[in-house]
Image (tube, rainbow, N blue to C red):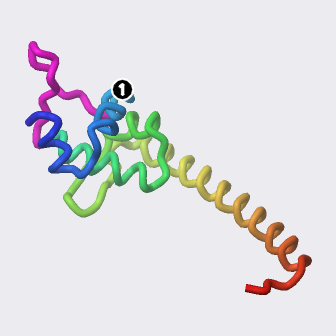
Amino acid sequence: MRIGEMVRRTGVSERLLRYYEEQGLLTPTRLPSGYRVYTDADVDSVRRIRTLLAAGLPTATIAQVLPCIRDDGATLAPVCSDLVAQLRRERKRITDAIKDLQTSQGMLDTVIAAGPADTD
């Protein structure tokens, strides 16, 4: 399928599909004319990529993770032994970022509470 059909089937823009290709996440074949040709497996890959992006993983990590992910259609599961440790490190990074944001939120709440009352 060409890129227009891929957009329709995945809901992902042409620009994002090209970006995924630049990042090594997708490798469509090319016709002699230069047009990209995608397969049904690429549709599944885009779904996995979107899930991993939503989980907070950067594209560089996703490129490493994709070959080691089993997809049963509902859940992604790691199949490479070293992948679990890598995913735990990513989870810790996200947890630390959440804690930092909560601290910032608390400080901002303190500043807001010290100000004049809202008149809205």
Front residue of this view, candidates 120 and 6 = 120
Q: How far across and down, in percent of the image, does residue 103 sit? A: 77, 64
Front residue of this view, candidates 115 and 38 = 115
Up the image or down, 106 lies above or below 50; here it is below
Q: Quadrant of the C terminus?
A: bottom right
Q: How far across and down, in percent of the image, does residue 30 sit? A: 14, 20
- Tell me, yes or no, whether the highlighted magenta stretch contains residue 32: yes
Q: Is residue 102 left or right of residue 92?
A: right
Up the image or down, 112 lies above or below 66; here it is below
For image coordinates 31% across by 29% down, the residue present is 21
- Tell me, yes or no, whether the highlighted magenta stretch contains residue 100: no
At label 1, which amino acid type do we have? Glu
For image coordinates 18% across by 39% down, the residue present is 42
Front residue of this view, candidates 92 and 55 = 55
Q: How far across and down, in percent of the image, does residue 41 sit? A: 15, 41
Up the image or down, 91 lies above or below 6; here it is below
Front residue of this view, candidates 1 and 63 = 1
Residue found at the very far top of the displayed protein = 32
Q: How far across and down, in percent of the image, does residue 98 sit? A: 65, 61
Residue found at the very far front of the displayed protein = 120
Overall secondary structure of the magenta section: loop
Please give the range of residues in magenta: 25-40
Kindly identify which residue carries mark 1.
22
Q: Is residue 50 left or right of residue 73?
A: right
Q: Is residue 19 left or right of residue 93?
A: left
For image coordinates 18% across by 45% down, the residue present is 43
